[in-house]
Image (cartoon, grey):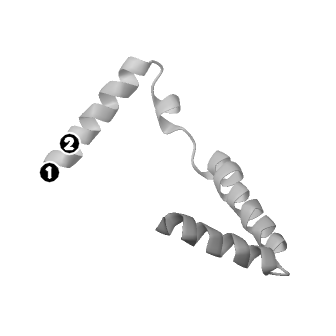
């Protein structure tokens, strides 16, 4: 019940804002840039470049996980 009241409060508030839609569009464009474009250029898939098979990748991840957790 509280979640529904919370949702209605924000939807009514954004409906009455004059700049609300423009601000949401700016927020969505910024999120798209951050997660879609920057990920491609700054966060390459290192496991794909370092290892050829899924078996090698899984072994590396499990070894690294075990090594870092056990320290």
Q: Which residue is mark 2?
A: 67
Q: Is residue 7 left or right of residue 58?
A: right
Q: Are marks 2 and 1 in contact (CB under 8 Å)?
A: yes
- Residue 59 rendering spot, x and y as whole percentages: 30, 26
The image quarter in which residue 20 lies:
bottom right
Q: Which residue lies at the image location 64% right of the left edge and 53% below the top edge?
A: 35
Query: x, y percentage for residue 11?
Result: 70, 70
Residue at 72%, 74% (x, y): give it. 12
**For residue 30, side relative to residue 66 (left or right):** right
Q: In the figure, is residue 16 to the left or right of 7?
A: right
> Which SS class for mark 2?
helix
- Residue picked out by circle 1: 71
| Residue 21 sits in quarter | bottom right
Residue 50 at x, y = what percent? Answer: 46, 31
Of residues 65 and 12, which is closer to you in this image?
Answer: 12
For disc 2, the neighbor class at 10 Å (few under 14, some 14 to 19, many from 20) is few
Q: Is residue 22 above or below residue 34?
A: below
Q: In front here: 58 or 25?
A: 25
Q: Secondary structure beneath disc 1?
A: loop
Between 46 and 29, the one lying in front of the other is 29
User: Which residue is at a point 80% across and 65% down the rendered structure image?
Assistant: 25
Disc 2 to disc 1, how far (Cα)? Answer: 6 Å
Asked if 64 appears above or below 60 in the picture, the reply is below
The residue most toward the left is: 70
């Amino acid at each position: 019940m509280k979640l529904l009241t919370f949702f209605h409060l924000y939807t009514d508030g954004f409906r009455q804002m004059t700049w609300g839609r423009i601000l949401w569009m700016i927020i969505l464009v910024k999120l798209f840039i951050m997660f879609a474009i920057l990920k491609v250029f700054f966060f390459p898939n290192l496991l794909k470049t370092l290892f050829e098979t899924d078996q090698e990748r899984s072994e590396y991840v499990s070894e690294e996980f075990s090594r870092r957790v056990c320290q």
